[in-house]
């Protein structure tokens, strides 16, 4: 349809030179929102400094802040959407009103009305009723004559007022797993916590209270055999008990009084125990003795044991005074943590929260550890259990020889077994109360493990809660972010067995020394409970009289920040004498040993087995290890190791990894210029520093992952520093760029490989992205800059509010971090303070020149470098290479001059990347995102620090850097294209990284240059796509495009204000050539308009990105591009998201600006028009093109394409329609809906004049196609109604949206799997939406999706949907108005206006809001007044449709809708009258419409319609202009007629529940219209519809046959065509009833009167349609013979039309029908018939009426009886209705007059003997039935049954008024006759029946032995009562006395003869069938048979001699003729 551009759409055009264009085209607008579209805002990039958040009140050491950088647009998230949806008006929909009223309606019991032939009311009363009713409000000025333009203007103002500004706020976003272009902002690096548990210790009470008890808590993991937390010491002793220790304790620090603690568990599992250990003051005696009193005494016996307790207490007081400083182990117990958590039961917790913490954990574990945790520990979540209070009553006493952790693990493992050894031990009874609960988010009064106060800490005097440090069971991968430097010393065991002398009660004193003098002990050992914060020493607990004790103490030490060679831990061993003896000191030293803290500059930790010296160590021992045999020293056990101790460091200063240590030490040496440097046992001189440095960089790959992660930020910073500042070694600049780049690539890959659980959807590792985001900075070149290089740039719009620009919301921020310049808080540690002081950060907080400062007292310890890390950029002062003593205030030029030595990081990075090869290049490619983002952040820092952000973009970067970038982009695009089939996952990541990179470059580089990079990428992909049509590659390009287009200034990048200049050689577009009369546009202007609406080259050049998006859309939607079907949804969502983001962007809120933005998308209209055939068909008719009339009746005819009335247009259009059927509906409903909403957005926001000019240029077929599109939009956005929302809510099934969603939901197990899925699902066919077999696949919704929405949510959904439907339809209405204006000036306006009218009518037919309808009716009135001939001459069909729609609205429950509809209807009549002074057509149409409404609509309300009729009457009365004409009378006439129909409706409503009655009433109404064929037809169709609803297909078919016969009658009058049926006679074979349709009576109208037979069915096509429908219904009813008869009428018509296709179809159906007759032989069932009689005055007209009812096949008598009894019981009351159980004649006098009686009898079709010759098949015997029979047994004395000789039988034969099947299911009985049979005749009938049964059973094929034996048994069995023998004995034993009975006697005798013969045959047959097991049974049968035969023999052989005398034969004949054969009684009743 549209002109083709010169560059194919699959290729990218050359972009405009953007920067050049902006210079050469200065903006015309001065300022305002339009001006902002032209250029990026000046503050687009800002650098913002964000201070670091600190958890604690006082910082551990001064820390720096983060510089992060955010692009300034916010996500258009759901909350945003909700925000934008606030204040929506509630739209009123009739559908909802009806729904509400149905819900409330009370089911009133209805009285049965008499219906037959009641008079239809009278004129007078009807008019009287109407005249006294009230009308609706009249529309003002409706009858005024005003010029059309004014009316249009008024309508438009009304329509445009109060419209919803944002269309997309009403349209829910597409469900995608995550939009690709959203970059999640990484979390700020922060301290790691696992799941946190709060334990409160409430009380500890023993049976006796005699001494203080000290407690500690810690967590242990049995499986890992690891203590997983430090100890928490608490003291629950009473004040008097504490006082016993007063001499030993100075004042207790508040931190040691804590009684609650927060534990953190990173890896919760079923193996975690909370272990509680108790200690007491050391006393004489072993643990068992000391524990004895606690086990023996009971609190209850306190009075009895008072003296003993006093004694014990006084002993304790003595021990406390003397030995108060020493402890001894006492008791322990353990709690299995998960039991508590699980039994406490989970709270109803927010699932989000649970998953959040799990997510957080999974990001920390490596892959390996993850595999271990998933084994079933998933259930171990500590985040949401109910708080529990525990009371622990049993403790186990400690065994002195089982104190080690090993023993503890054995005990714990044992505790889990049911037969625990521990249970057999005698416990210590006590009561310890604990509260365990999930820790709150921000607990108050908390202390960190370093004793710092955590915010909030309102009052320092409150008892605190302690945070307990975790020792995670497995590695945790989180970078250090706080300062922590702790050491834990755990003495484990001592072996003094071989030591001479007395040493039994041994304690170890531990001290941390910074020299050898005893005064050098440092106060750095943490106190336990109720004591000071810090001590200079700590003692271990004593095990009484044990020379080789185990220890279980944990001594916690705060390490100084800077360590020297003199720092060491000193252990002194003492023997404590427990008894007070003369001359014996309290403690005697018995040994010494020590551990130096540093070895070769590295911290010493781990397990030590130390020798113990017997005497004090000599001078300067501390620098040596005790392993060194010092001369002249005495050692225990010959210097063997006898003391086991473990030292563990938790430090963010000491890496504890040799490779990292070496690297940092060398870098530090460079910084400080200290040569030679000692590393380990090597001395490195300056001359071999370079090799060492390079090897240490390479060796970083060998270090452990855990330390690498912990020191990640520092490590990367140092590597960046080495790249940017190549060190000068021995006067030479050493370039380390390549080495650093290689090691960075490998570290980044390691992190990705092992920590793959912590990646975002783009595969970015969160640790790395947060490094770039918050930490990375360019080492600054200007020492004065307040934040030297940690920079955060933000792309910001100027508005105060950050724009919500792209819904695509990448809040991706590139960012940085920086020293905390605001006041450095005083540090808790003096050393740290001094270091900071000297490090160049003076109190005024400005940066001091530390360029070459060598004064920093770093000591020789490389360990101290780590401290530098904590002042994140302190170590990055420019102490780079050589010492430049710069003055303090560097000028900018100087700092730029400094660049010659430093290299720009991004330039170096690009260079290294371009030149890399092999595994290094591969490594960088794997994690390209990391290097791209580093590069971008570096670029921005560079521009910011050199103040180049203002400079023109063209000269910001050197040529070589641009070349490197071009080369880089080109090679990476090459990689994408060449590797996507082999390595899709990598390529997807690479593709997205590249897109984000280019997106970022658009903010800082020459935009034209970036466009050329995009084009380079495009070209490579296109070239590959030419060679290989692969959807995966196309899908990658879409992701790329989508990310690039998510740029904040996307609109600006598209030059929305550039006016398209026509191309140099304008190729006249097809559209302008065909435009009929574009009188107001010159050729050039045409071209210009065309360029705006087509993807022409100028369009694509100037709107570069929009051009790419639309080209992609066009290419992928191209139906010939079949490989791309799977990408429909994807490409549509790209467009949808873009438009949705423009819509919600405050920058584009101004309508003028929005129009500019919409201009970028004008070609979308054409693209969607092209795609129309592929869209999902929302109309539900299967063919969008013929936009079939949705009239409310049940028959849709496939009419010829109605759109085309212009021959020239027809050709191209029909072809399209024909092709359309091929790929119709290849789009999913969801994608189609998205595409259509995009189209509506463009139509809503585009400039109306531009649209109008373009519409003028379109050809008729194109305009018609646009109308088809709007028609589809109406259906697509139809309001579903609250009912639908509730229904959808109750269904838990949903149609699967597409494969992707289905797979994803099925597999979304863990995060890892999700990651995997999301990745895979983006592959090629993940999003296929047109897989054929998936058409209606449903699957179970995952439980996670909360299904049951609240009432409020449903209300909200309905509110949004209502507003969307209203807005969408108003946009369609606006567009239709523009089209009407366009069409008025074209030649072929009829076709177009017809199309407009179709769309309008269709919109009226859908669920619409009152608001829309009033505008719609206004438009319709204007249309009719402008083009009256359109309706009354051209589109008759549409006139009918319009009447129906208007009437439907006239009966609306909403008054405004009624007002407008009545006005429209009145004007329609008036216009019709004015044209021809007669409005027969409208009259006819309205009457028919009402009939059809009444017949089909369930919820039709006649009250409302009466009101509208009154309104119309009122208009007629007030219409002054026409008062003198016949018009008012005609209106009154019409209104009266409608009123009559309404009265019938009321009755129909009353019988809504009574189907027979309802059909009878409709039948009567139809009969009343015998004289007006159109209306009769309407009612016949209404009946057909009702029957179909109830599955009475045969009756529905009859209605259709009657309709066809009616149409045939009138057609034959109108035109004489040989092949058409000659009226209803032709249909006789189908049904004998059809003759009642013959139009022979004198009152029949002639068909050529105006308005008569004008309906669509009174045509040949209509007739054919009715017959086809009839055939289909017969087929459904299983009456295939009738199908044949119907087609006999149809075939001549198709033959005459030479319609081979139709004939083929018919013959196919015939073949099917006959096939079914053969196939279903013997299995067909049609109907069951019952006679139903009604007796009683309650029945009204039905009283004493009798009917034959036709019920579905196999209906039992009980069923119909139950149905009728139930129905009438409900109506009259259950006790009022009785069913007469017999079928005897009813005597009404004997019945209770107050009750209703129903008599129901089963009847069978009855045929005379002569009829049976014709009625051969089952069908014959069940079709065209008018006579039925039933039998009643009786005896002469009134009983029903008697002996054989007195048993008579009455046969009743009924005749109905019509033959079954008819157009009703019950038919009146009009005639009745009875035949009475004498006993002998009854016997004859019985014997004949038996004989027949035998014959049938014998000859049945295949044989059925069971049935045969049953029949035989009944025939020859001996016991049969009234069996054959008895019958013979009664009637044949003697010759009757009455000669009249001779013949009967003889007949019976012959019957018996036949009977015995049949018995014999049957026996013979049975013999051949039975097996050996039935032989005996056969013999028995045979014996019986012979007995029977013998008994019968004499009876059978006795002939009546008189019958065989030849003389008498004549007489016998005469009797025959005289009819004396039977005593006949004819009772005939005629019921007419």
Image (cartoon, grey):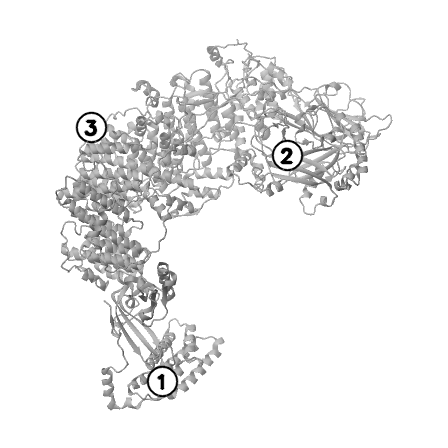
Q: Which residue is mark 1?
A: 1931
As helix, strand or loop, the secondary structure at mark 1 comes to helix
Q: Which residue is mark 2?
A: 200
**Could you give the CA–CA distance between mark 2 and mark 3, rounded to whole angstroms?**
87 Å
**Could you give the CA–CA distance between mark 1 and mark 2, rounded to whole angstroms?**
107 Å
Query: In the displayed structure, does residue 404 sit left or right of residue 459?
Result: right
As helix, strand or loop, the secondary structure at mark 2 comes to strand
Q: Earlier in the sequence, mark 3 or mark 1?
A: 3
Q: Mark 1, residues whose alpha carbon is within 10 Å: few (<14), some, or many (≥20)? A: many
Quarter occupied by the C terminus: bottom left
The residue depicted at 18 percent of the width and 62 percent of the height is 1625
What is the residue that sits farthest to the right in this orientation?
582
| Residue 571 in picture, x, y percent from top left | 75, 26
- The answer to whether 1912 is drawn above or below residue 1302 in the figure is below
Q: Which residue is mark 3?
A: 1083
**Quarter-wise, where is residue 1150 in the image?**
top left
Verify CB contact (< 8 Å) between mark 1 and mark 2. no
| Residue 777 in picture, x, y percent from top left | 50, 21
């Amino acid at each position: 349809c549209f002109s083709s551009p010169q560059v194919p759409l699959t290729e990218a055009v050359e972009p405009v030179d953007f920067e050049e264009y902006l210079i050469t085209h200065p903006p015309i607008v001065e300022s305002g929102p339009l001006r902002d579209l032209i250029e990026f805002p000046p503050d687009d990039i800002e650098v913002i400094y964000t201070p670091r958040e600190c958890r604690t009140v006082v910082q551990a050491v001064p820390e720096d802040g983060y510089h992060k950088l955010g692009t300034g647009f916010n996500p258009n998230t759901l909350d945003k959407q909700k925000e934008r949806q606030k204040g929506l008006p509630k739209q009123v929909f009739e559908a909802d009103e009806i729904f509400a009223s149905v819900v409330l309606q009370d089911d009133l019991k209805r009285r049965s009305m008499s219906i037959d032939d009641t008079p239809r009311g009278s004129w007078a009363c009807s008019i009287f009723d109407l005249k006294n009713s009230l009308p609706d409000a009249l529309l003002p000025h409706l009858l005024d004559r005003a010029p059309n333009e004014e009316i249009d203007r008024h309508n438009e103002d009304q329509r445009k007022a109060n419209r919803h500004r944002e269309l997309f706020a009403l349209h829910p976003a597409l469900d995608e797993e995550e939009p690709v272009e959203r970059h999640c902002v990484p979390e700020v690096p922060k301290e790691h916590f696992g799941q946190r548990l709060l334990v409160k210790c409430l009380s500890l009470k023993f049976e006796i209270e005699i001494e203080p008890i000290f407690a500690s808590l810690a967590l242990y993991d049995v499986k890992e055999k690891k203590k997983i937390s430090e100890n928490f010491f608490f003291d629950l002793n009473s004040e008097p008990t504490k006082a016993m220790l007063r001499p030993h304790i100075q004042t207790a620090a508040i931190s040691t009084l804590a009684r609650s603690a927060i534990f953190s568990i990173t890896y919760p599992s079923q193996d975690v125990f909370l272990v509680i250990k108790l200690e007491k003051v050391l006393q004489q005696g072993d643990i068992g003795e000391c524990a004895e009193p606690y086990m023996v005494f009971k609190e209850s016996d306190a009075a009895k044991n008072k003296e003993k307790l006093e004694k014990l207490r006084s002993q304790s007081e003595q021990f406390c005074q003397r030995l108060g400083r020493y402890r001894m182990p006492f008791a322990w117990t353990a709690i299995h943590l998960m039991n508590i958590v699980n039994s406490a039961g989970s709270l109803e917790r927010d699932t989000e929260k649970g998953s959040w913490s799990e997510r957080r954990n999974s990001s920390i574990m490596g892959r390996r550890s993850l595999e271990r945790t998933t084994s079933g520990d998933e259930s171990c979540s500590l985040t949401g259990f109910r708080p529990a209070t525990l009371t622990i009553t049993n403790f186990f006493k400690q065994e002195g020889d089982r104190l080690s952790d090993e023993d503890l693990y054995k005990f714990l493992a044992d505790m889990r077994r049911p037969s625990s050894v521990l249970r057999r031990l005698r416990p210590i009874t006590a009561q310890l109360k604990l509260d365990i609960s999930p820790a709150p988010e921000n607990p108050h009064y908390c202390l960190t493990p370093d004793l710092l106060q955590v915010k909030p800490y309102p009052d320092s005097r409150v008892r605190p809660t302690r945070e307990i440090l975790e020792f995670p069971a497995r590695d945790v991968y989180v970078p250090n972010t706080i300062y922590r430097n702790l050491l834990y010393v755990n003495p484990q065991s001592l072996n003094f067995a071989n030591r001479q002398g007395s040493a039994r009660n041994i304690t170890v004193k531990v001290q941390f020394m910074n020299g050898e003098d005893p005064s050098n002990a440092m106060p750095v050992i943490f106190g336990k409970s109720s004591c000071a914060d810090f001590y200079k020493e700590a003692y271990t607990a004593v095990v009484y009289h044990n020379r080789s004790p185990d220890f279980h103490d944990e001594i916690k030490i705060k390490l100084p920040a800077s360590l020297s060679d003199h720092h060491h831990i000193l252990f002194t061993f003492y023997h404590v004498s427990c008894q007070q003896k003369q001359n014996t000191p309290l403690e005697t030293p018995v040994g010494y040993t020590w551990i130096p803290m540093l070895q070769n500059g590295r911290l010493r930790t781990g397990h030590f087995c130390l020798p113990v010296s017997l005497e004090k160590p000599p001078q300067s021992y501390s620098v040596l290890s005790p392993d060194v045999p010092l001369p002249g020293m005495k050692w225990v056990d010959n210097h063997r190791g006898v003391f086991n101790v473990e030292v563990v460091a938790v430090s963010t200063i000491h890496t504890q990894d040799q490779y990292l240590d070496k690297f940092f030490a060398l870098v530090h040496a460079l910084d400080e210029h200290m040569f030679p440097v000692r590393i380990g046992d090597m001395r490195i001189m300056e001359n071999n520093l370079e090799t060492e440095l390079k090897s240490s960089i390479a060796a970083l790959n060998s270090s452990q992952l855990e330390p690498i992660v912990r020191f990640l930020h520092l490590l990367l910073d140092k590597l960046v520093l080495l790249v940017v500042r190549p060190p000068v070694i021995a006067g030479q600049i050493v370039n380390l760029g390549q080495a650093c780049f290689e090691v960075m690539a490998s570290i980044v890959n390691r992190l990705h490989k092992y920590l793959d659980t912590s990646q975002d959807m783009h595969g970015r590792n969160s640790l790395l992205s947060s490094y770039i985001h918050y930490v990375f900075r360019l080492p600054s070149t200007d020492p004065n800059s307040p934040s030297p290089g940690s920079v955060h740039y933000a792309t910001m719009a100027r508005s105060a509010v950050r724009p919500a620009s792209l819904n695509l919301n990448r809040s991706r921020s590139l960012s940085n971090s920086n020293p905390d310049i605001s006041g450095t808080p005083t540090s808790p540690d003096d050393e740290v303070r001094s270091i900071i002081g000297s490090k160049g950060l003076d109190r005024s907080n400005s940066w001091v020149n530390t360029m070459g400062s060598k004064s920093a007292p770093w000591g020789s310890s490389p360990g101290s470098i780590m401290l530098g890390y904590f002042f994140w950029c302190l170590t990055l002062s420019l102490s780079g290479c050589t010492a430049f003593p710069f003055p303090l205030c560097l000028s900018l030029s100087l700092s730029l001059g400094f660049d010659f030595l430093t290299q720009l990081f991004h330039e170096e990075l690009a260079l290294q990347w371009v030149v890399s090869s092999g595994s290094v290049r591969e490594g960088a490619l794997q994690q390209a995102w990391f290097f791209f983002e580093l590069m971008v952040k570096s670029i921005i820092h560079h521009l910011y620090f050199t103040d180049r952000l203002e400079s023109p973009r063209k000269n910001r970067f050197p040529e070589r850097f641009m070349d490197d970038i071009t080369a880089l982009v080109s090679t990476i695009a090459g990689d994408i294209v060449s590797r996507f089939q082999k390595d899709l996952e990598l390529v997807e990541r690479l593709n997205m990284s590249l897109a984000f990179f280019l997106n970022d470059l658009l903010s800082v580089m020459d935009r034209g240059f970036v466009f050329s990079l995009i084009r380079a990428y495009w070209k490579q992909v296109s070239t590959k796509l030419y060679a290989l049509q692969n959807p995966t590659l196309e899908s990658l390009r879409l992701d790329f495009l989508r990310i690039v287009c998510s740029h904040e200034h996307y609109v600006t990048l598209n030059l929305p204000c550039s006016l398209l200049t026509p191309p140099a050689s304008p190729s006249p577009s097809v559209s302008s050539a065909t435009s009929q009369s574009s009188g107001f546009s010159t050729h050039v202007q045409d071209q210009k308009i065309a360029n705006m609406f087509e993807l022409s080259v100028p369009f694509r050049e100037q709107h570069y990105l929009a051009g790419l998006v639309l080209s992609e859309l066009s290419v992928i939607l191209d139906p010939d591009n079949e490989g791309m079907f799977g990408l429909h949804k994807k490409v549509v969502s790209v467009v949808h998201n873009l438009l949705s983001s423009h819509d919600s962007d405050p920058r584009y809120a101004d309508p003028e600006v929005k129009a500019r933005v919409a201009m970028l998308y004008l070609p979308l209209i054409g693209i969607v028009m092209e795609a129309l055939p592929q869209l999902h068909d929302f109309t539900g008719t299967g063919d969008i093109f013929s936009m079939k009339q949705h009239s409310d009746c049940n028959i849709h005819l496939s009419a010829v394409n109605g759109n085309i009335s212009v021959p020239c247009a027809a050709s191209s259009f029909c072809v399209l329609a024909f092709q359309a059927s091929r790929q119709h509906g290849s789009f999913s409903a969801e994608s189609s809906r998205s595409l259509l909403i995009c189209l509506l957005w463009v139509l809503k926001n585009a400039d109306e004049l531009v649209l109008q000019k373009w519409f003028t240029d379109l050809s008729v077929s194109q305009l018609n196609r646009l109308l088809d599109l709007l028609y589809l939009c109406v259906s697509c956005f139809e309001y579903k109604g609250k009912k639908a929302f509730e229904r959808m809510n109750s269904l838990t099934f949903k149609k699967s949206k597409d494969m992707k969603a289905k797979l994803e939901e099925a597999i979304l197990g863990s995060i890892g799997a999700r990651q995997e899925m999301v990745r895979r699902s983006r592959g090629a066919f993940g999003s296929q939406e047109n897989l054929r077999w998936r058409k209606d696949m449903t699957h179970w919704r995952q439980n996670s999706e909360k299904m049951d929405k609240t009432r409020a949510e449903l209300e909200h959904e309905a509110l949004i949907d209502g507003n969307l439907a209203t807005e969408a339809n108003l946009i369609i209405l606006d567009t239709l108005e523009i089209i009407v204006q366009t069409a008025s000036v074209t030649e072929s306006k009829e076709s177009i206006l017809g199309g407009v009218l179709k769309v309008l009518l269709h919109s009226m037919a859908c669920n619409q809001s009152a608001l829309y309808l009033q505008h719609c009716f206004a438009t319709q009135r204007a249309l009719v007044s402008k083009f009256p001939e359109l309706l009354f001459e051209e589109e008759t069909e549409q006139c009918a449709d319009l009447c129906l729609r208007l009437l439907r609205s006239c009966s609306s429950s909403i008054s405004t809708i009624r007002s407008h509809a009545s006005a429209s209807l009145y004007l329609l009549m008036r216009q019709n009258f004015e044209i021809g002074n007669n409005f027969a057509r409208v009259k006819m149409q309205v009457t028919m419409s009402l009939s059809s409404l009444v017949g089909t609509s369930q919820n039709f309300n006649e009250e409302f319609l009466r009101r509208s009729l009154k309104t119309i009457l009122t208009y007629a009365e007030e219409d002054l202009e026409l008062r003198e004409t016949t018009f008012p009378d005609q209106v009154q006439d019409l209104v009266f007629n409608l009123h009559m129909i309404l009265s019938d409706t009321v009755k129909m409503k009353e019988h809504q529940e009574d189907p027979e009655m309802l059909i009878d009433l409709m039948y009567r109404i139809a009969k009343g219209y015998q004289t007006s064929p159109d209306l009769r037809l309407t009612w016949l169709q209404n009946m057909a519809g009702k029957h179909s609803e109830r599955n009475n297909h045969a009756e529905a078919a009859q209605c259709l046959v009657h309709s066809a016969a009616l149409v045939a009658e009138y057609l034959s009058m109108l035109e004489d065509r040989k092949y058409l049926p000659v009226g209803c006679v032709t249909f006789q074979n189908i049904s004998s009833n059809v003759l009642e349709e013959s139009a022979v009576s004198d009152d029949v109208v002639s068909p050529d009167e105006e308005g008569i037979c004008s309906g669509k069915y009174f045509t040949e096509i209509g007739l054919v349609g009715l017959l086809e429908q009839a055939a289909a219904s017969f087929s459904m009813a299983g009456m295939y013979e009738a199908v044949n008869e119907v087609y006999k009428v149809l075939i001549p018509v198709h033959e005459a039309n030479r319609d081979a296709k139709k004939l083929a179809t018919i013959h196919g159906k015939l073949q099917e029908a006959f096939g079914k007759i053969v196939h279903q032989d013997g299995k067909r069932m049609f109907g069951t018939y019952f006679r139903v009689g009604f007796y009683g005055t309650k029945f009204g007209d039905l009283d004493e009426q009798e009917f034959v009812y036709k019920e579905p096949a196999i209906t039992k008598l009980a069923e119909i009886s139950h149905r009728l009894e139930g129905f009438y019981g409900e109506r009259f009351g259950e006790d009022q209705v009785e069913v007469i159980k017999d079928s005897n004649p009813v005597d009404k006098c004997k019945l209770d007059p107050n009750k209703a009686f129903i008599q129901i009898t089963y009847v069978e079709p009855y045929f005379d003997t002569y009829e049976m010759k014709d009625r051969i098949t089952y069908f014959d015997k069940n079709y065209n039935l008018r006579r039925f029979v039933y039998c009643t047994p009786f005896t002469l004395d009134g009983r029903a049954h008697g002996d054989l000789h007195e048993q008579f039988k009455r046969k009743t034969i009924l005749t109905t008024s019509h033959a079954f099947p008819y157009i009703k299911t019950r038919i009146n009985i009009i005639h009745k006759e009875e035949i009475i049979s004498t006993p002998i005749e009854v016997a004859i009938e019985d014997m004949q029946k038996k004989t027949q049964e035998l014959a049938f059973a014998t000859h049945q094929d295949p044989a059925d032995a069971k049935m045969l034996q049953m029949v035989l048994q009944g025939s020859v069995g001996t016991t049969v009562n009234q069996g054959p023998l008895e019958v013979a004995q009664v009637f044949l034993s003697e010759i009757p006395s009455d000669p009249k009975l001779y013949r009967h006697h003889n007949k019976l005798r012959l019957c018996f003869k036949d009977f015995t013969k049949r018995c014999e045959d049957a026996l013979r047959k049975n013999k051949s069938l039975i097996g050996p097991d039935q032989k005996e049974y056969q013999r028995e049968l045979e014996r019986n048979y012979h007995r029977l035969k013998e008994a019968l023999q004499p009876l059978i052989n006795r002939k009546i001699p008189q019958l065989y005398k030849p003389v008498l034969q004549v007489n016998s004949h005469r009797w025959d003729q005289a009819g004396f054969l039977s005593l006949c009684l004819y009772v005939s009743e005629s019921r007419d």
